[in-house]
Amino acid sequence: MRTVSQRPLVVVLLLAIVGLCGCGKGSGGQLSSGGPARKLAPVDAQGAVSVATRNTTRLGGANVTADAAAVARAVYPGLTPATRPQAVVLVDERDWLPALAASVLSSAPAGAPILYSEGETLPAVSRQTLEAMHPLGAPALGGAQVIRIGKTAAVPRGYLTRTVTAGVPSDTAASVEGLLLALDRGNAPHQVIVLAADAAPALTMPAAGLAAESGAPILFVTPARVSAPTAAVLTGLHRPSIYVIDPAALGARTLHELHHYGPVTSITSAALPSAGNAPVQNAIEVARFTDGTFGWGVKEPGHGLVFANEARPLDAPAAALLSATGDYGPLLLLGVATQVPPALVNYLSDIQPAYTNAPQFQPVRGVYNHGWLIGDEHAISAVSQAEIDSILEISSRTQSSEETSDSQVE
């Protein structure tokens, strides 16, 4: 068992900004380009407080709405034009698959954060975060500042909006792909991620971060067939590279049919371990996978990493922005809040940074890992955070052991 440092966690108030930036709305729906600062309502503490250790930062609160707000504020404090997003995506927290499909909008060039509504109600933390970020408006979408996916809460007056009609999952995903195409000025993606619409959410959560990092849209199929909207997107992309997660959920018939639209590659294995470990191992496989320039390929130290609880699937789209900016991290999962699973411990140990005690090597010249933890202690406990922090810490290796390791590699 790894020994965990007992140092106290440091509570850091993240972006407790009151009255420092613009109002978040253009007058009469027009975009605001600056002008005198106007007082903002403070961001609710549950969406603005982080808990930091040496190598980890916790973002979020008691629910996915707070988690999404905290991620958005960490990336876009809204104090300068460069720290304001073009647009913000708003999704109903009850709509898992539309939220998952919308994750790709966090990729470049849009870099759009996701906020959640509670049905037709816009929670205070989402509204305050929207106002604080003061979205600039996406020129490719006619200056739209808020992209509403499906039937969500109405946004405050004064924001320009673009609505994506949500129908069956494949229809919604196809509409999001069309929006992505518009945002990228018609530059079609060369890769897509295909998931089974009825797959276990915990097994498809890692697709959110991968889509955000790569810009590959997420499309949905069923074990019975490739639906017409998905087929139309694949046909229009002219034989893109098709990557699937949880291929067992797609079924042999659909996998065979997908080959008609482009080369198909399974990111994760069809035979996953027992159900209790499957989401954890599945996420690790996504983090390790690489195919040319596509995929994370995180097999060595020096990376950002995002950690979430598999029981809170909507945290994956909420955290997708952390996979597309800053230190770009794949999503990794814990099965329960109070334990870092052995498979995850082994993976993190494999990519733990190290330096030798040779005079020419110093830790300040080393590489580092950093972990973003999503949610409160009901999602990931403080003890689990401390253990993750310890595994991510750069460690000293003796020169002789380093030389032995190098010779073994050769």
Image: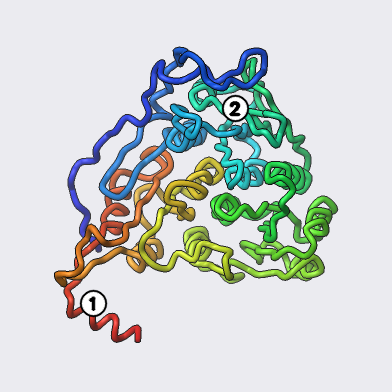
Foreground residue, 235 or 306? Answer: 235
Residue at 82 percent across and 50 percent down: it is 229
Q: Secondary structure at mark 1?
A: helix
215 left or right of 124? right
Q: Quadrant of the N terminus?
A: bottom left
89 vs 335: above or below: above
Residue at 68 percent across and 58 percent down: it is 192
Residue at 51 percent across and 31 percent down: it is 84
Tell me residue 268's x, y (percent): 58, 67
The dot on residue 129 is: none
Badge 2: few (under 14), some or many (20 or more) residues near its Cα, within 10 Å?
Answer: some
Q: Secondary structure at mark 2?
A: loop
The quadrant in which residue 214 appears is bottom right
The quadrant in which residue 21 appears is top left
Residue at 49 percent across and 34 percent down: it is 82
109 left or right of 140? left
Residue type pointed to by label 2: Glu
The dot on residue 402 is: 1
Badge 1: few (under 14), some or many (20 or more) residues near its Cα, within 10 Å?
Answer: some
Marks 2, 1: nearer the viewer: 1
Foreground residue, 151 or 274? Answer: 151
Tell me residue 9's x, y (percent): 24, 40
280 vs 131: above or below: below
Tell me residue 30's x, y (percent): 66, 19
Foreground residue, 259 or 214? Answer: 214
Residue 323 in view (yes/no)? yes
253 left or right of 56? right
Residue type pointed to by label 1: Glu
Closer to the chain start, of discs 2 and 1, is: 2
Real-space Cα distance between discs 2 and 1? 53 Å
Residue 277 in view (yes/no)? no
The dot on residue 118 is: 2
